[in-house]
Image: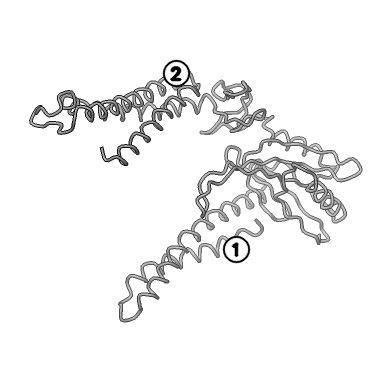
Amino acid sequence: MRNAGPWRNRALFVFASGMIATPVAFLLPESFVGDTARALLSFYGITAIIFGGLFAVIWHRDQRATEALDRGEGVLGRWRIDAESWQKFKLLNDEIHRQPGVFLNELSLRDEVPAEGIEIIVGKTAIQIDGSIHRIPTHGTPEITHSELHDGGSGPSYIELSLYYPGGGQGASGVPHSPTRTALRFPVPGTAWREARKITAHFGGLLPGEPDFFHGRGDGSDPEDLSRCGSCGFETHQFKSRCPQCGAGLQSRRWSRRFGLGLLVCGIFLSGLMGAVCYYTVPMLLHPGVEVDGTRFSGSPGQALIVLGIFMLVMAFSLTTLLYGVWQMKTGKSSRRVAYFMLGIFVFLMLVAKVIQMRGI
């Protein structure tokens, strides 16, 4: 994104106009504005608030990253590419794109190069190329799956970062967004090779990082950083969401314990809720048609058995969630078998609910 500051200001203006238009649409008297104009004004206001606010936040973050690089904060390397070298790299990039299975370059390469050349500034969490900012958070999206410095030989040398976007959510047609893989390639002059090696080591996770809420230093000093692939057994202390060998999901011991805490809380809530339900309803279900404590189950014995079976399945799901959470918190590991078992119970309960709805039991 080039010149994020002006675009951020425009987005803020759109957001502010939406904040004004939305209440105005409802406050104007009916004699002054018709229903159609009111509907259009309110639609514009809501749309402007959503999209104006969203893009204002995105472009504000881009602008902050640009300003931080200009101040030299966290800069790993800075160099300029002359017009001739830039044109050679542009031809090389086009040639790379013609190769099968190659990720497309996110960088938009201009045809005309100014006389002073093109400046490239590489920071720890952002890269600015020709005034275009590319934010690459240490722990977030996009994730860098590979970092390499290519020796161009007789041609231009360049750094290539393989980027992974996990996708998720649904599009307008209801189809889920699939994961996306792209690349960020930019040229490196011969005078900046020392900086380039440091940059590829940094983005490749070969250098100790700054610990935060998501991950530690990633250098093996903290055992909680260890992630193990349940499919192929690959292990790493580096921050990775996908296994580089088989593509399966990775989860560190730290996050296994955190998810375990979440499962424990959910398991306690569900178990307590089901315990209370069973305490008040099971005596009636065991004696259908008989009044127990002033109430009775008016269904047939068969229907009572179905309800009891559902209660037992829900209780089994709740207790499994609770115990699995305790186990994850204690070991820092995850188990596919338990996860599949819980998923099986959930799917079976959904099928039973669907059958009951269709037959009106």
Residue visible at 36% across and 26% down in the picture = 317
Assess disc 1: are there few (<14), some (14-19) or many (≥20) residues with their C-alpha within 10 Å of its C-alpha. Answer: few
Residue type (three-letter) at the residue carrying disc 1: Pro
Q: Nearer the viewer, mark 2 or mark 1?
A: 2
Residue visible at 83% across and 50% down in the picture = 89
Task: Report which residue position mark 1 lands on.
Answer: 6
Q: CA distance from mark 2 to mark 1?
A: 51 Å
Q: Left of 267 or right of it: where is 8?
A: right
Assess disc 2: are there few (<14), some (14-19) or many (≥20) residues with their C-alpha within 10 Å of its C-alpha. Answer: some
Task: Report which residue position mark 2 lands on.
Answer: 330
Residue type (three-letter) at the residue carrying disc 2: Lys
Q: Position of residue 187 (x, y in %)?
A: 80, 46
Residue visible at 61% across and 38% down in the picture = 138
Q: Please, which colouring scheme is shown? A: one colour
User: Hey, which quadrant is residue 146 in on the image?
Assistant: top right
Tell me the quadrant of the picture where the C terminus can be found. Answer: top left
Q: Position of residue 338 (x, y in %)?
A: 45, 22
Q: Residue 355, labelled with which disc?
A: none
Sequence-wise, which precedes: disc 2 or disc 1? 1
